[in-house]
Image: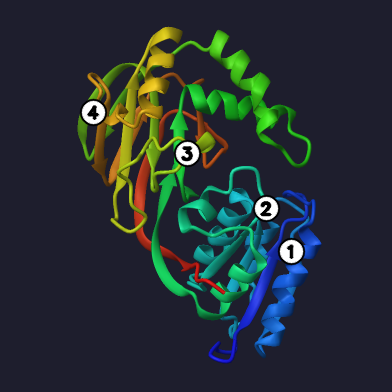
Amino acid sequence: MTNDKRVKVLAVVNPVSGSCGLSGLLRQVGERISSAGSHMTVRISRAAGRAGHLAAEAPDDTDAILVVGGDGTVREVVDGLMAAGRQVPVAVLPTGTENLVAKELGMPADPATVAATLLRGRPMACDVGVANGRHFLMVTGVGFDAEIVHRVARTRDGHITHLTYFWPVWRTFWTHRFPQLTVQADGECVFEGTGLVIIGVTSRYSAGFKICRQARWDDGMLDLCIYPCRSRPKLLLHALQTVRRCHDRWVGTVYRKCRRVRIDGARTVPLEVDGDPGGHLPAEYTILPSATVFLTPVKP
């Protein structure tokens, strides 16, 4: 690592997120940082929202922030930095359930790669979405998937796994009533009817789906995908087309890029934002181009 520059790193750690082996992974990253003549300070986030405060309060000479946690912790850190008006580059040591941000960046849970990225990674300016005033980095949804997220949140107790979603998905599949929605994109009404809506800053969605598959993190646009749907068989058909990655060309599906979206419907219709409950309709969505900075991974 003789060519590595000396950096000061603040590691913001969520101890609840995938805690198995967490201390060992973090210790290995720290050892590699130290061996390069650099320094890493570790701060633990023990309450919701605390990660954002820790990031905002990072010393002025901090060169990078390492988020050790899942997508929720990454978003908290980005929220904190944006609230403080700072663009400190962020790297991720993924330990959550989905780790969509890390997957989008191509960052594995490998201490050697994480350390090399902190020392030599290239900063990349990335867009941030806004849903009813709340930031999101990946996707937000209205209707079916949001109802699942709300069910999970009501029973969540600590770290969750993919298995945690089994019963909420099953129950929602059989009980969901597809809501009547009106969707405007950049001031134009593009949909009126029953269905579900996904809006993405990036392409990745849970379980490997790429619903907003044309989305890019640096194009200054939102990707809007609307599935017209009023029945379970139609929902399964949409899922099949999504797996085949041809859903955005399927008859009836609305897919477009835009900068602003408004969705109206019954005030009981739930929203989800990056896999967390996001309130209920109505909803306004906008995009903040190049609002945050991530470090792209490099090989050790």
Q: What separation in Å lies between label 2 and label 1 (alpha carbons)?
A: 10 Å
Q: Which residue is mark 4?
A: 249
The residue type indicated by label 1 comes to Leu
Q: Is residue 128 visible?
A: yes
Q: Is residue 291 above or below residue 119?
A: above
Q: Which numbered disc, 1 or 4, marks the residue that appears first in the sequence?
A: 1
Q: What separation in Å lies between label 3 and label 4 (alpha carbons)?
A: 18 Å
Dot 3: few (<14), some (14–19), or many (≥20) neighbours within 10 Å?
many
Q: Which numbered disc, 2 or 1, marks the residue that appears first in the sequence?
A: 1
Q: Is residue 59 visible?
A: no
Q: Which numbered disc, 4 or 2, marks the residue that appears first in the sequence?
A: 2
Give residue 195's position: percent from left, percent from top: 37, 18
Dot 4: few (<14), some (14–19), or many (≥20) neighbours within 10 Å?
few
Q: SS at mark 2?
A: loop
Q: SS at mark 4?
A: helix
Q: Tell me which residue sits at (68%, 70%) in the image.
A: 11
Q: Which residue is mark 1?
A: 25
Give residue 235's position: percent from left, percent from top: 42, 15
Which quadrant, please, contains the N terminus?
bottom right
Give residue 207's position: percent from left, percent from top: 53, 34
Q: Which dot marks residue 95? A: 2
Q: Are marks 2 and 1 in contact (CB under 8 Å)?
A: yes
The residue type indicated by label 3 comes to Tyr
Q: Tell me which residue sits at (70%, 86%) in the image.
A: 35
Q: Tell me which residue sits at (65%, 33%) in the image.
A: 162
The residue type indicated by label 4 comes to Arg
Q: SS at mark 1?
A: helix
Q: Which residue is mark 3?
A: 205
Q: Is residue 105 above or below residue 3?
A: above
